[in-house]
Amino acid sequence: MAKKTVASLQKGEGRTYSKVIKVVKSPKTGAYTFQEQMVPNEAVKDLLK
């Protein structure tokens, strides 16, 4: 028999943080690197500006 998944058991806000990955060019070598940060959901748009 297959088990039935009950979605109503989840309570609360869910995820409050997002992982942001930015591409940054190194001023020394000119190579591109990736910067990863965990940021609150409200600050994602401000960080990417």
Image (cartoon, rainbow, N blue to C red):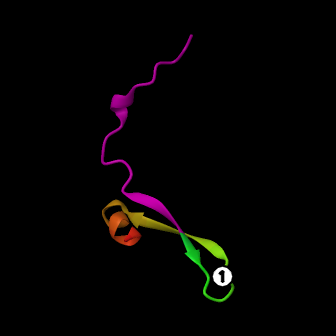
Span of residues in magenta: 1-22
At a point 49% along the width and 69% down the height, the residue shown is: 37
Total tally of numbered discs in the picture: 1
Which residue is depicted at the point 55% across and 14% down? Answer: 2
Q: Is residue 28 left or right of residue 40?
A: right
Q: Name the residue beneath numbered marker 1.
A: 30
Q: Position of residue 40 (x, y in %)?
A: 36, 64
* Most distant residue in the top direction: 1
Q: Which residue occupies the foreground of this view, 14 or 33?
A: 33
Query: The disc labelled 1 sits on which kind of residue?
Result: Gly
As for residue 46 lying within the magenta part, the answer is no
Vertical side of 5 occupied by 12: above or below: below
**Residue 10 versus residue 27: which sits nearer the camera?**
27
Query: Label 1: how many residues lie within 10 Å, few (<14), some (14-19) or many (20+)?
Result: few
Relative to residue 41, is residue 11 depicted above or below?
above
For the residue pair 31 and 39, the one nearer the viewer reads as 31
39 vs 28, left or right, is: left
Give percent across and percent down for residue 12.
30, 45
Residue 10 in magenta stretch:
yes
Identity of the residue drawn at 46% across and 19% down: 4
Q: Quadrant of the N terminus?
A: top right
